[in-house]
Amino acid sequence: MNPVIVPAATVASAERFGAYRQITIDAPEIAAGARPGQFMNVCIQPGGAHVLRRPFSIARADRNAGTVMIVFDSIGPGTQWLGAREKGDAVDVVGPLGHGFDVTADPGVDIIVGGGYGTAALSFLAAELDARGGLVHAIIGARTRTRVYEDGVLDESCASIAVVTDDGSAGVQGLVTDPIPEMIKRFAPRVVYACGPMPMLRAVAAAAADAGVLSQLAVEEFMACGIGVCWTCILPIRANGDLKHARSCTDGPVFEGEVVAWA
Amino acid sequence: MGVDLSISLGGARLTNPVLTASGCFGSGKEMSRFVDLKTLGAVVCKTVTPEPRLGISPPRGAETAGGMLNAIGLQNPGVEAFRDNDLAWLAERNVPAIASVGGHSVADYVRCVEALRGAKGLIAIEMNLSCPNLEDRGFMFALSAERTAEVTGATRAAADVPIFCKLSPDVTDLVPIAEAAVGAGADGLSLINTTLGMAIDPHTFRAKLSTGTGGLSGPAIKPIAIRCVWQVHRALPHVPIIGMGGIAGVEDAIEFILAGATAVAVGTANFYDPAATETIARGLLDFCNRHGITSLDEIRGQVKIEG
């Protein structure tokens, strides 16, 4: 579906989730077509010095309720402003944007790998894969326990969930990518889906490629526009052997790990 | 009495003066999801060069107070692919198009202009003489009156539509460069391109762009752009100017027209307000109705400076 501009969408709920903020927004026009892996572009300081919108992965779209949810870490001026929104406040959003994860293959076994709040988008994906009759195994991780995103939907949608933290405060100590080779051997997945920081995505792509398994990665890049015209958010990819600069916003944000030309 | 927003740009007739700034609107396809392109005077496309260009490595953009820096390096599919795909797409929809051409040499510009001869729907060509992002950073046609005249004369001779020279604000005196362009045959001027800027991350000590410096755009540069349009219009009152730099709303557009612009182009605002161009085009009509203006000719260049 075509993205729409919703200049005054109402915040239906705003809450803390561990170290993160989780905001649900009334935007039936966006919820109607939003898919896992797509994003919304949110105005973060109307009339202020920060003119550019910020992209946020869609962490849930409830077609019946007409709501979409985003999960984020309030670390910069934009996310701090957004983190201060309360129920009833208005936000200016554009979405759904970009191509989501491709789940069109016949249902099978898949692995999802989520880093930090990146797991929120994968929880949305896991629910879709599960609803399609697939079997999902999750590896989720973060620096520390409060930064692991594990919600009820993920619990219901996954056949197994392995938790990994840098400091060992939850699950196993290590990197979220550590268990991938063993998990691939054990479950023989068709696809490894991942969302998280770029170094993590790179490691996921390498581990999947080593095992001969496809990977689909939702990347995060600086985006001035998010709608395909500014060409700031490019990701180097290989297409028929040639280096190309693809737009993370409209050509992505989901890319197959094999096509990414890692720096 | 009805309002007539139509304008003439060096002979090309446009239904209204709201254009898109090159590099901020693609060739309209992506933006047509948000904007009815028929409501705009014309679409000014992203700059193309004779050969395809990959552009520079990321990071290519950074937000700054009231605007942003960018350094893309003229990534584009080459003039022929642009003509056959992008221009053809606009022509099929009867959307007037202005191509933007760039290059490293006079021959590059001439080659682009020749490739565009006879292109359907093309109403003018904008010569990007001021892109600050090429590898050869010391060199920019718009920094010198002589070089501007040289490239303008050569392309004017090769073009079959009006040509507009897009100049840089990063010069000590813009007027002689504008005069050189017009003297060499430019049908009009586009003012202004981005102004060169730089931002550094104080925590990592790294420049925020991979090239170090890049073009500053957005509301932050609007006063510079207004000043440039006003100075050049005062010196060359009969030369049509496409004014741009930080236009985000109808009142910004009016400001440019009061400074002397014939048309206005919306740039960075498209990034954060995808409907900005259509909103401004419709807003101009409302503004004129409210103020009893029947043609923008009545207010063009009519800024009052008291004191």
Image: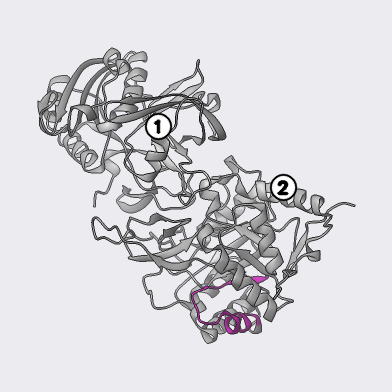
Crowding around mark 2 (Cα neighbors within 10 Å: few <14, some 14 to 19, many 20+) is: some
Q: How far is disc 1 from disc 2 in space, using C-alphas?
A: 34 Å
Return the residue found at the far front: B307
Instruction: Name the amino acid type tagged 1.
Output: Gly
Residue underneath mark 2: B282
- Is A107 drawn above or below residue B144 in the view shown? above
Which of these two is toward me, A55 or A191?
A: A55
Q: Is residue A134 left or right of residue B178?
A: left
- Whether residue A90 can be seen here: yes
Q: Which residues are magenta?
A: B161-182
* Residue B102, position as x, y percentages in the image: 50, 69
Q: Determine the chain carrying the residue at label 2.
A: B
At horizontal 55% and vertical 50% (from top left) the residue drawn is B270
* Residue B6, position as x, y percentages in the image: 78, 58
* Residue B26, position as x, y percentages in the image: 53, 53
- Is A13 drawn above or below residue B193 in the view shown? above
Which of these two is toward me, A85 or A72?
A: A85
Q: Which mark's residue is nearer the viewer, 1 or 2?
A: 2
Q: Determine the chain carrying the residue at label 1.
A: A
Residue underneath mark 1: A100
Q: Do residues under tags 1 and 2 come within 8 Å of each other at their CB atoms?
A: no
- Whether residue B189 can be seen here: no
* Residue B50, position as x, y percentages in the image: 48, 67
Q: Is residue A109 left or right of residue B186?
A: left
Return the residue found at the far bottom: B146
Instruction: Name the amino acid type tagged 2.
Output: Arg
User: Per the image, is B257 magenta?
Assistant: no
At horizontal 63% and vertical 73% (from top left) the residue drawn is B159
Crowding around mark 1 (Cα neighbors within 10 Å: few <14, some 14 to 19, many 20+) is: many
**Do the residues marked 1 and 2 share a common chain?**
no
